[in-house]
Image (tube, rainbow, N blue to C red):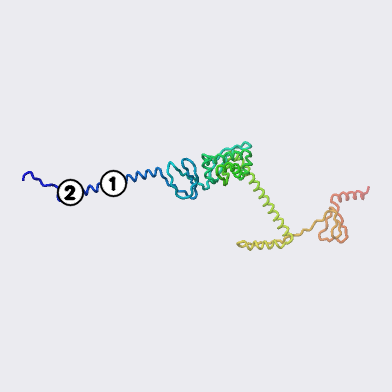
Amino acid sequence: MQGFEPSAAGPGSGARVPRMEWHVELLIALIAVLVIGLIVAAVVRTFVSVTTIHDYERGLRYQGGRLVGLAGTGAHVTIRPFSEMRLLDVRPAIVPVDGQEILTADGVTAKISLSARYVVGDAVAAVTRDADFRRTLYLLLQLALRDAVAGRSIEEVLAARRELGPEVREACAARLAELGVELLEVEVRDVMLPAELRRAYAGVVAARKEGQVSLERARAETAALRSLANTGHMLDENPGLLQLRILQQLGDSSGSTVVYGVPEPGAGPKRRAMPEPGAVSDRGAVAERGAVPKRGAVPKRGAVPKVAPAVGSSRRRGSRIGEEDAPA
């Protein structure tokens, strides 16, 4: 019995080998199917595309490089390179025109910017009649703005700022209609002037405002003077108003205020007028220059007061009388 070796494989080992081979073959088959699927998907993705068109878009269908028409909203399948779908957004949009320096009729350089709102009305014309209708729109707006500003002075440009937009729109409307583009509105955004001109206009505005302030101040002073004049006339016609006003002021004031000797309006101490020389008094007496009435004496009605002679003249007169009476 030498040379006899027992087999390493136990009972049932022959059945396990075919089962393991079957699993390997199944795994290989699945991997092959997966690879084939990926290859097919890549091929389909390369040559077949699905395009979804929204309601705010227009789809232009091409077959063999030729436009065959517009496609409606929804999903559309195209097979390249035999067919192609191109989308165009037709919603209203705004194109800004940056500030450009324009020379006015009076030689002033102004930097003016625009903003335009447009909408694509004919998608086929917008795509087939111009290589880039947006760039064409931008250039047409610039040229129309230059033509509108070049024929005006700087003052006319500032005064007609709101009229420049409609004028530019009318100038560009016919050319853009051929491209299937409709201009909805055009507005001027900014008008920038040189620094020297801005300072000059600021000085003009400041001078106008100062004039208005002076005018209003003069009107206020005139109204105040007119009110004072009316108040004076009212007090002259109604003297009691002053007392009522004083009482009202005393009632509104805080604290204790005492006012003594408030005269009535128009009332005051009466002074007796001195008679002028040679004037006739109310009693009929004639007052002469140099007459001195006696103390306590009451001149009678119709009596003419005597004039007392001067001291020097009486002495001279007395000396003359004495010389005449003296014996020779």
Label 2 belongs to which residue?
Answer: 14
Expressed as whole percent of the image width and height from the top left, the position of residue 50 reads: 43, 47
Q: Nearer the viewer, residue 323 or 34?
A: 34
Compare marks 1 and 2 and give the one earlier in the sequence: 2
**CB atoms of marks 1 and 2 within 8 Å:** no
- Which residue is painted at 15% across and 48% down in the image? 9
Expressed as whole percent of the image width and height from the top left, the position of residue 254 reads: 60, 61
Q: Nearer the viewer, residue 322 or 268?
A: 268
Of all residues shown, which one is farthest toward the left?
1
Number of other residues with Cα within 10 Å of mark 1, as a class: few under 14, some 14 to 19, many 20 or more? few
Q: Quadrant of residue 39?
A: top left
Whether 159 is drawn above or below 262: the answer is above
Amino acid marked by disc 1? Ala
Expressed as whole percent of the image width and height from the top left, the position of residue 157 reads: 62, 41
Report whether 10 appears left or right of 50.
left
Local SS, label 2: helix
Alpha carbon distance from label 1 to label 2: 24 Å
- Which residue is painted at 28% across and 46% down in the image? 29
Residue 29, disc? 1
